[in-house]
Each structure stands twice: as structure tokens, then as C-alpha cells.
Image: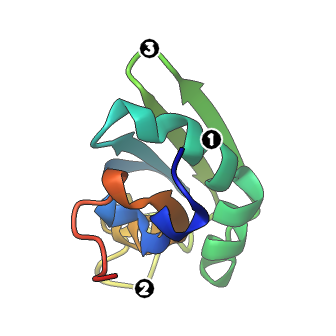
């Protein structure tokens, strides 16, 4: 059995990739692990509460997480994260697609074997 030393803090982009889009003032981000074994750990750590905290500075008011275990993937619908939406915002690059990078920067704890580029021991 693996010891706790096998667990490492990393960023989501080291264990998953994302696809995103937007509709009005709502961002939609799908999070897909590189390895299926990562899915259960993502369920535990990438919660609606954590994602809402991450997007709070953008004005997000609600996050709904949809679990897609057969893919495996998670889909997050983030309300009010686009400063009024692409056509209403003064921000020149306010598309939901760019917000996937914000989510992929979230810190998670993972076994070294699931991390693309684990830190040296």
C-alpha cells in the first residue's frame, strides 16, 4: 500500500484538461481527467464550493456541477462569471473559453502516479 509521501499537491492541469464555452453571462467548463482513476479524486476535491470561490472575483453567483462518470468527466455551469456576457462586457477577452485556464490552476492533492509531471521527491 502506498504511503502518504506518494500524495503531492499539484495543479489540475497536471491531471486533467478542460473544454469551455459561454452562453450569455454563464460559463460552461468541462473537466476531463487524463487517467480514469483520477475521476474519484476530482469528485472529492473539485466541488461546487471551491469552484465558486475560485470564480468569486469574476462576480460568479452560483456553480452547478454535473457528474458524468461514464466519460469520466465533470461539467461546471458557472452563473454570472462573464461580466454580463461576451456582448455586454467591457473586457475584450471575456469568452468562457479562457476561463478554463483559471479552473486548471486550482490546487489538488493527487498520488504521484496520476500526475503528468510530478515534483521531484
Residue 35 to residue 10: above or below:
above
Tag 1 or tag 2, which sits nearer the N-term?
1
Residue in the image at 33% along x and 53% along y: 113
Q: Are marks 2 and 1 in contact (CB under 8 Å)?
A: no
Question: Where residue 100 sits: x, y (%)?
Answer: 37, 62
| Quarter location, residue 97 | bottom left
Q: Toward the viewer: 1 or 10?
A: 1
| Quarter location, residue 59 | bottom right
Residue 90: assigned label:
2
Question: Where residue 98 sits: x, y (%)?
Answer: 31, 68
Circle 2 sits in a helix, a strand or a loop, which is it?
loop
Report if residue 28 is visible in the image: yes
Residues at marks 2 and 3, CA–CA distance in whole angstroms: 39 Å
Circle 3 sits in a helix, a strand or a loop, which is it?
loop
Residues at marks 3 and 1, CA–CA distance in whole angstroms: 13 Å
Residue in the image at 70% along x and 64% along y: 50
Residue 105 to residue 113: above or below:
below
Residue in the image at 60% along x and 54% along y: 78
The image's colouring method is rainbow
Circle 1 sits in a helix, a strand or a loop, which is it?
helix
Q: On the image, numbered disc 3 is attached to which residue?
A: 70
Residue 63: assigned label:
none
Q: Toward the viewer: 99 or 108?
A: 108
Q: Are marks 2 and 3 in contact (CB under 8 Å)?
A: no
| Quadrant (top left, top right, bottom left, bottom right) of the N terminus | top right
Residue in the image at 47% along x and 63% along y: 6
| Quadrant (top left, top right, bottom left, bottom right) of the C terminus | bottom left
Q: Nearer the viewer, mark 2 or mark 3?
A: 3
Report if residue 82 is visible in the image: no
Q: On the image, numbered disc 1 is attached to which residue?
A: 43
Residues at marks 2 and 1, CA–CA distance in whole angstroms: 35 Å
Amino acid at each position: 500500500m502506498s504511503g502518504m509521501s506518494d500524495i503531492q499537491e499539484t495543479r489540475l492541469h497536471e491531471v486533467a484538461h478542460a473544454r469551455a464555452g459561454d452562453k450569455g453571462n454563464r460559463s460552461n467548463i468541462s473537466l476531463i481527467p487524463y487517467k480514469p482513476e483520477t475521476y474519484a479524486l476530482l469528485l472529492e476535491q473539485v466541488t461546487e464550493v471551491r469552484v465558486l470561490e475560485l470564480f468569486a472575483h469574476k462576480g460568479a453567483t452560483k456553480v452547478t456541477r454535473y457528474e458524468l462518470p461514464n466519460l469520466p468527466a465533470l461539467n461546471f455551469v458557472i452563473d454570472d462569471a462573464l461580466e454580463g456576457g461576451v456582448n455586454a462586457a467591457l473586457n475584450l477577452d471575456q469568452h468562457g473559453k479562457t476561463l478554463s485556464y483559471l479552473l486548471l490552476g486550482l490546487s489538488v492533492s493527487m498520488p504521484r502516479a496520476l500526475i503528468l509531471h510530478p515534483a521531484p521527491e
